[in-house]
Image (cartoon, rainbow, N blue to C red):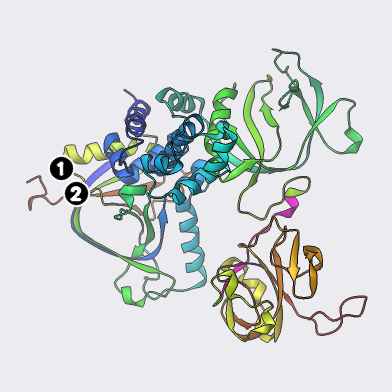
Amino acid sequence: MEYRLERDRPFTLVGMNFFGNPFKAAAAWDVDNEIGSLWKRLTAYLEGHPVAALPPDVPAWFEAHVMHPASAATGDYEVFVGAETERPLDGPLELVVKALPARDYAVVAMRCAEMEPGWEERVAAEAVGRYGRAIESRWGLQRYDSRYSSLEDPDSIIEMWTPLAPGRPDGTAP
Amino acid sequence: MTDGDRRLASVGRALDLVEERLRDGLDVGAMASAACYSIFHFVRVFTELTGHGPYDYLMRRRVAEAARELVSGDRSILELALEYRFESPDGFSRAFRRCFGAAPSEARKAGAYAEGSARTPITRERVRASMEAGLTIRAERLPDVLVAGRPLAPGEAAGPGAELMLLRPGSDPFAGRATHGPADYPLLSARAPGGDYIGVYGDPPLDLGLARDRLYRTAIPVGSARPRAPLELARLDGGGRPTALLVPVAFDGSPVAAGRGAGAMSLKPVGVVRSPYEARGDAPRQGWLSSAESVIEVYEAFEEALVGVADAKRLVALYWGDRADRSVLKSPTPFSAEPRGVFTSRSPNRPNPVALCVVDVISVAGRRITVRGLDALDGSPVIDLKSYIEEPIRPSGSVLQ
């Protein structure tokens, strides 16, 4: 795993979203969970509909998990998948725009082979240990670029972007 | 401590909190805090380890405890509903029916409920056993299964070579190998009906008690399914050890008939109706009696099937009457003093509420077809669209109108 700190990074993304418990179907009986279905819905749409809001060769795709006020009551939350855009107003009706406020992010690049159960806890612990900062738990991001091919490929690389609570200008805890 | 131990300890604290606070205000945020996880991470881990979403588990536990008190005590349904944090008796009644298939008043009158499906507390030991057994759940559709073999004596294990074991209440287990076709029919055989099954898979030998708990108290209720035959099918490895336990099910809320051939009766909506009729009383008795316009939105997956629809002046639209009463077999009609059987009437209430309308096509925009003459309620699933033929189409010479 490789760690780095991305400073003061805002995001404006265009894509599609889903609200609920995305692991319900997978846990019940299906190999596909709702996040997989969401990606399929987005890629199927983009295959048939060029989107002016996205560059011709998207450099990276993002998956955001966002808490809403209802999340504390029911555990349901928003999953958004899409890519960065500089022209959010050019998105078609079928796509939505997600703006995330600027934050420092603890970024961890990991191979799919390293994604055994418990990796999320280790990433969170590493982030706190390295940067001395609390995690901002209202959202989280995963970044997929040319280093990623599929979850079945052990050498595919995924980046986990974990927002950190505001800190000092040098990136350390206040 | 391994990663698995840490996850188990975290989820275990949340499970304890549920039992402590069934009657108090408790939400998923508090459960996640007890587990020391963010909410989205907690939802993921809890669902993976228990098979339930955390909110679903909390609701089912509250309903199960209320049900136990309901049949064993004399407290009012309202009192129990409020004690277990339901905001109204109606909300409690809906949750109760979803869990047990009956109203609370019916359970009280009968002095019993479907206890086997009640969600008893999930313990740390149960979660650990599931993790160690590598349990996974999946649904599958099977053809008719004919097993050639023999009944097992009490306590006898299936021997090497057996592929399947049928388990039925009141009968000895029947183990053997699967056969295909009449030519293979053996003298001694047992049959499991084809159709939808939900199965629990695990490392051999699968603990059947653990598998049943996961099936009947988690996978089947969470999947809005119900067993459709009193039998279980165990898959065996080469040494006669179980690797999976499957139960034939019907999924609630889907237009799938139970019984033989059920697998072939599966329908999938091809679109949805957007109409001005929101409630049953709003819709005209026949679509052609109204000039109101509706929109048929065809789903993206069926876009290719719309080629040529822009040239059509009329279409035959078949939709599913999802709010119809499926228990009705006789219905009053404007044309007779006596109620008629629904097979000789056009009542929307019928065992299989398939509705048919000939509609005028007003305009087509992408996958949205604006039509006149459709009597469907807003949100009705569309089953099919067909071209309308102007000529008589029936041997009797009558015209489809």
Q: Quadrant of residue B234?
A: top right
Q: Which residue is mark 1?
A: A131
**Residue at image x 38%, y 74%?**
A91
Answer whether residue A169 is magenta in the image: no
Marks 2/1: CA–CA distance: 9 Å
Badge 1 amino acid: Tyr
Q: Please report contact status of discs 2 and 1: CB closer than 8 Å, yes or no.
A: yes
- Mark 2 residue type: Leu
Q: Secondary structure at mark 2?
A: loop
Callout 1 secondary element:
helix
Which picture quadrant has residue B254?
Answer: bottom right
- For residue B56, above or below residue A79: above
User: Quick check: A73 left or right of A133?
Assistant: right
Which portion, as a residue range, is magenta?
Answer: B263-274
Q: Which residue is mark 2?
A: A164
**From this viewpoint, is residue B215 visible?**
no
The image quadrant that residue A10 belongs to is: bottom left
